[in-house]
Image: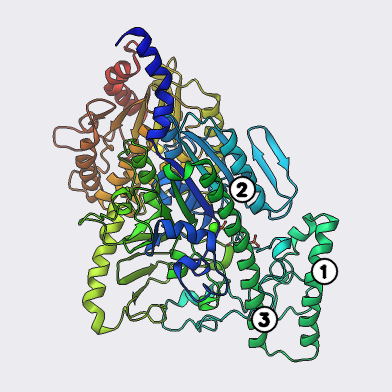
């Protein structure tokens, strides 16, 4: 090509590039029940339609078996970003989890591939967003009225209604973005999350409507796990006087309303907003209170009244979401972006609108397990279709990556939906989805996990060791577990097999679910101290492990100083740690500013000693640690050590367990970034007996042992860190 032509071609390249790759518009809301979207049908579709969300459905596809992996906010969002279940991405609950933004996410990969990336609205992942060119997010849960936003520039107070403001910001960003690049925009509402505060313009919407009550509004929780009765998310018992039901002043009926919090949103309003609110609300409240005073309402009537108030406020919030979806779609139409933009409407999980007597989510029952997922993509998705393929939020990241022509990294647990979107679900598509809820104080829903296939759902409740099995075809409302019905014995057996298989496939076991030891008072301070050291940075060599590694600070001090004193080394060994604790620590700050040449990893002997974990599970924990290190620190090498022999004699069961783990983990070496070093011979005599002179307690080396250990590793460490050997 002649130089001039080449230049011209290069100048055109970004424009061609942008047209080539689809834009991705991810319209997302918080707690949006499928029953509150008319495209899904459902009992409310005619009374409270969502015409704009339905526009996406009309031009695209509605997924009717779309599920989350963990029905709460942060976990679902972290899963969407990473394509990994929440126990793998390190955000398993809203109880103090912090998203480790150093891990690979789809926005980061799209950004690298030339996309402009933006997130506006609810984030709720505790740490600042990474991988976004633009972010403007609500702090934590955010507010409906006159919300604050945080961005790299700081915190800003905005006046108005949150759902409208988020859309204003989204459209403004679409206008101002670099139009030579394709974009991904995540536009994420707070609505219709609790406390369900409608916009002033919707205060009287549905005023004259009486919404049909779900058949299970007065569910008695019989025939299922005993834990159902412990939850605190009932319309009848757990809605508050102030924040939820929006009465002012003291709780006048503590038998029917909880008293925990006043309506903080009302306090945020301007005087004009308050006045407009009061004009509609005060008379409605007074009418109810007059009926109460006159003794006209029996307890069930009060529940019915609360249900109406709850569901109306909720659906009013949905109305604002729907109007704003319409505004964005109009913008895409007007600018011609519609034809090359994949538009998704989704929500972090489903929600109960009185089914089983509940509000909130968390349970693996259908209403909260489900996520709305409606997609439109001109030329790819056939308009007006419905799809029953089992999909899950782990699938979104790989879908976006494939849509953008970006390779999908190996660690991603979901599958790209591209063939499914084209209406060509592969014959070997998954037959079941896996669900995991770790339990939280809020609403007292017991931990449980399980699997769902086309027809059946199996749930397990570890606190009571109960199994529940539902035949969704015969019992779509999930009112009776058939786990003990002999007619279902074979189904139960099959489902248990599926459950075990899914847990293996998704790495679910005590060794792989990140865990703290906050109940032991030394552990947290040591962790905090290590985080501090990590933040200081400048480490070339990092040791990770348990007491054997921690012992470099004790019996091994002399050897440490001799061999590593000049090597900028960091000791991340914690006495008594198992693989799951290491996973938690590495996701929670101990790697934050650490960028070493080499990690030395030895962990697992406590998985063996404390619980006698099956060797494959301990090995799996070690595998996840290696994956994590490789993902977070792509420039570092890893020296993976065999777990030290324990107990005097080779016949000892625990010794053998460690050997079985070692037989597995040596295969994790890739001859490049991960090198395996077998340490056994250093401590054993010819008959494989462990020398008391080196390991007096048959578990931990003494000073002689540490010197031996260091010596055996030395040539490897020297080579892998590029430093001269210490003699
Ligand atoms: C708040 C709500 C809960 C809700 C959680 C989690 N209480 O704590 O009802 O379950 O959020 O929601 S509130 O009184 O503060 O509204 S999530 O969407 O973030 O998972
Ligand atoms: Ca939510």
Neighbours of disc 2 within 10 Å: few (<14), some (14-19), many (20+): many
Looking at the rendering, the quadrant in which ligand 1 lies is bottom right
Local secondary structure at mark 2: helix
Q: Report the Cα–Cα distance between label 1 and label 3.
A: 20 Å
* Element under disc 1: helix
The numbered mark at residue 167 is 2
- 350 vs 106: above or below: below
- Asked if the residue under mark 3 is in contact with the one under mark 1, i.e. CB atoms within 8 Å, the reply is no
Image coordinates of residue 63 in percent, x first then y, are 38, 61
Q: Is residue 339 above or below residue 195?
A: above
N-term-proximal mark, 1 vs 3? 1
The Cα–Cα distance between marks 2 and 3, rounded to whole angstroms, is 33 Å
Q: Is residue 550 visible?
A: no
Residue 305 tag number: 3
Whole-percent x, y for residue 142 in the image: 65, 51
Which of the colour schemes (rainbow, by chain, secondary structure, one colour) is used?
rainbow
Rounded to the nearest whole Å, what is the CA distance between mark 1 and mark 2?
27 Å
x, y (%) of residue 331? 56, 46
Rendered-image quadrant of the C terminus: top left
Question: Cβ of disc 2 within 8 Å of ligand 2?
Answer: no
């Amino acid at each position: 090509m002649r130089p001039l032509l080449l230049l011209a071609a290069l100048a055109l390249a970004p424009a061609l590039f942008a047209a080539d790759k689809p834009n991705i518009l991810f319209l997302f809301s918080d707690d949006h029940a499928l029953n509150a979207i008319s495209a899904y049908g459902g009992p409310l579709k005619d009374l409270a339609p969502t015409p704009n969300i339905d526009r996406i459905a009309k031009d695209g596809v509605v997924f009717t078996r779309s599920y989350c992996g963990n029905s709460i906010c942060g976990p679902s969002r972290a899963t969407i970003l990473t394509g990994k279940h929440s126990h793998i991405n390190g955000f398993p609950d809203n109880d103090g989890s912090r998203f480790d933004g150093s891990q690979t996410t789809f926005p980061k990969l799209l950004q690298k591939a030339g996309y402009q990336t933006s997130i506006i609205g609810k984030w709720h992942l505790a740490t600042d967003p990474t991988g976004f060119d633009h972010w403007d997010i609500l702090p934590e849960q955010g507010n409906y009225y006159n919300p604050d936003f945080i961005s790299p520039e700081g915190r800003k107070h905005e006046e108005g209604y949150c759902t409208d403001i988020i859309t204003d910001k989204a459209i403004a960003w679409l206008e101002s973005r670099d139009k030579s690049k394709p974009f991904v925009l995540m536009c994420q509402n707070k609505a219709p999350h609790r406390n369900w505060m409608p916009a002033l313009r919707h205060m009287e919407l549905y005023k004259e409507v009486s919404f049909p009550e779900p058949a299970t509004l007065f569910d008695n929780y019989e025939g299922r796990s005993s834990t159902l009765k412990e939850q605190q998310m009932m319309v009848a018992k757990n809605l508050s006087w102030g924040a939820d039901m929006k009465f002012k002043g003291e709780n006048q009926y503590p038998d029917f309303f909880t008293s925990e919090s006043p309506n903080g949103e009302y306090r945020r309003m301007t005087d004009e907003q308050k006045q407009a609110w009061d004009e509609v609300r005060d008379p409605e409240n007074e009418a109810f209170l007059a009926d109460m005073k006159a003794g006209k309402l029996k307890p069930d009537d009060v529940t019915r009244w609360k249900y109406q108030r709850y569901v109306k406020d909720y659906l009013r919030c949905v109305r604002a979401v729907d109007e704003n979806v319409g505004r964005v779609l109009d913008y895409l139409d007007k600018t011609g972006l519609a034809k090359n933009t994949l538009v998704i409407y989704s929500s972090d999980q489903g929600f109960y609108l009185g089914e089983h007597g509940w509000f909130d989510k968390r349970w693996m029952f259908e209403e909260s397990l489900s996520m709305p997922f409606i997609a439109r993509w001109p030329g790819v998705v056939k308009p007006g279709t419905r799809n029953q393929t089992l999909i899950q939020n782990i699938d979104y990241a790989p879908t976006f990556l494939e849509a953008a022509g970006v390779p999908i990294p190996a660690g991603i647990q979901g599958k790209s939906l591209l063939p499914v979107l084209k209406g060509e679900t592969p014959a070997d598509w998954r037959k079941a989805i896996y669900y995991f809820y770790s339990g939280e104080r809020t609403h007292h829903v017991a931990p449980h996990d399980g699997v769902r296939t086309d027809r059946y759902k199996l749930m397990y409740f570890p606190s009571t060791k109960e199994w529940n099995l539902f035949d969704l075809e015969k019992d779509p409302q999930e009112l009776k577990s058939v786990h003990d019905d002999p007619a279902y014995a074979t189904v139960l057996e099959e489902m248990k097999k599926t459950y075990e298989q899914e847990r293996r496939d998704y790495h679910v076991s005590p060794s792989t679910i990140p865990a703290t030891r906050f109940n032991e008072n030394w552990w947290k301070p040591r962790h905090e101290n290590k985080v501090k050291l990590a933040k200081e940075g400048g480490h070339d060599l990092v040791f990770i492990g348990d007491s054997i590694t921690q012992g470099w600070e004790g019996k091994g001090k002399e050897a440490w100083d001799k061999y590593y004193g000049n090597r900028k080394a960091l000791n991340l060994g914690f006495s008594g740690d198992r693989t799951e604790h290491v996973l938690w620590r590495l996701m929670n700050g101990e790697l934050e500013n650490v960028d070493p040449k080499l990690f030395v990893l030895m962990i697992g002997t406590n998985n063996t000693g404390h619980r006698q974990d099956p060797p494959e599970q301990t090995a799996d924990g070690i595998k996840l640690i290696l994956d994590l290190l490789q993902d977070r620190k792509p420039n570092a090498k890893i020296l993976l050590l065999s777990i030290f022999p324990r107990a005097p004699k080779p016949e000892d069961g625990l010794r053998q367990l460690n050997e079985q783990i070692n037989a597995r983990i040596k295969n994790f070496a890739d001859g490049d970034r991960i090198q395996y070093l077998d340490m056994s011979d250093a401590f054993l005599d010819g008959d494989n007996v462990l020398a008391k002179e080196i390991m007096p307690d048959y578990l931990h080396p003494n000073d002689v042992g540490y010197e031996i250990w260091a010596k055996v590793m030395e040539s490897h460490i020297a080579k892998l860190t590029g430093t001269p050997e210490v003699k």
